[in-house]
Amino acid sequence: MTHVLITRPYDASRQLADRLEVHGLFPVVMPLYTFKARQPDVDIGSAWSASDSRKLAVFTSTRAVQFGLPLISRQDPIDDLEIAVVGSATRASLEAAGYPAHLQAKTGFTSEDLLQIPGLAERAGVAIIFCAPGGRETLLNGLRALGWNTFNAMVYERVPLQPEPAQVDCLRDCDDLISIWTSISALKLAEEYLPRDLWGKILNSPALVISSRIEHHLSQRGASSVELADGPGNPDLLKSVLRLTEQ
C-alpha cells in the first residue's frame, strides 16, 4: 500500500487524508507546525494615515486573513483601502469575513503572480503585507521595486511540532512513499527533526510540491523525483497524488 506523507497544518492535512483513504491510500498526517498570533512591529493605522497616496493591504494566506483582518477592523475606517490577495483560498477566506478582494492575479497563486498585476505599477503608495516571519521577501522587494512604500506586518508565527514516534515508525516501515510539501518551512523542520535515515528515504521517494520555489529547494537537498502539483488546494493535491499512483 502506498503511504502519503502530509505535512501541512492539521485541519488541511486531515481533510486531504480523508479523501486519500477513499482511494485506498494510507495517509500519514504529520503537521510540522501550528500557528499563533503575534503583535506586528508596524503601526498599521499610522502607516496608512501618514500618506495621501494609495493604501494597499496584501493578504498572503488564509492564516494572514485570520490573524491580520482583526487588526484592520479595529482601526478607524480607512478611505479608499484596496485589498490584494495571493491565491483563491485567501480570497474566499477574506470574502467569507465580509471584505472584498480588489486585486488578485488572473492565474497562479504565488507572490510572483500577484506582482504581475498591471494596476500595481500605477500610482504606488503605501502597502502593508500581512504575513508570518521568514517569508514573503519576494513580495516585499517586488512591491518596493514598483515604487510602493512597503511594510511587513507579521501578525502570526509558526510554532514547530515534533513528529511523534508512531509517525516515524510508520514512515520507516512502509515500502511505497509519496510526500507532499506546501512550504519550505515544513521541509526545513522535517530535515531537522526526522532521523537521518528517514529523511534520506523521503529524498529518494517521489515528492509533490506546490511551487517552483519549493521544487528548487527540495532538489537542492538531493531529492530524486520532484513533481509540481496541479495547485495548492486539497482537490489539486488529490488529483496529483492519484496521477502519481496511476489511479
Image (cartoon, rainbow, N blue to C red):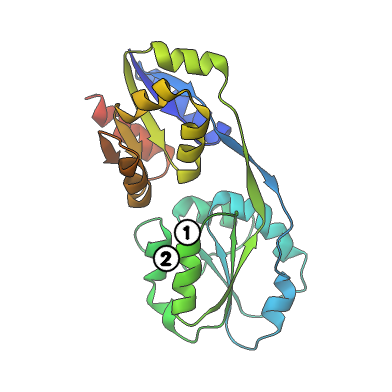
Quarter of the view holding residue 142: bottom left
Assess whether mark 1 and mark 2 are in contact (beta carbons under 8 angstroms): yes
Residue 69, visible in the rendered structure: yes
The label on residue 216 is none
Q: Amino acid at mark 2?
A: Leu
Per the image, the residue denoted by label 2 is 114
Q: Closer to the camera, 176 or 85?
A: 176
The label on residue 86 is 1
Image vertical order of residue 108 relative to residue 237, above or below: below
Instruction: Please report the residue visible at 64 percent of the width from the left and 55 percent of the height from the top.
Output: 97
Q: Amino acid at mark 1?
A: Val
Q: Closer to the camera, 150 or 26?
A: 150
Q: Residue furthest front?
A: 196
Q: Position of residue 18 (x, y in %)?
A: 47, 23
Say how many tags the image has.
2
- Counting residues from the N terminus, which is met first, the one under dot 2 or under dot 1? 1
Instruction: Please report the residue visible at 72 percent of the width from the left and 52 percent of the height from the top.
Output: 38
Q: Position of residue 78 (x, y in %)?
A: 70, 76
Q: Position of residue 228 (x, y in %)?
A: 29, 43
Disc 2, SS = helix
Few, some or many C-alpha atoms within 10 Å of disc 2 (few <14, some 14-19, many ≥20)?
many
Q: Position of residue 247 (x, y in %)?
A: 24, 24
Instruction: Please report the residue visible at 38 percent of the width from the left and 77 percent of the height from the top.
Output: 118
Q: Closer to the camera, 242 or 220?
A: 220
Tell me the distance, in whole angstroms, between the alpha carbons under discs 2 and 1: 6 Å
Q: Is residue 241 left or right of residue 69?
A: left
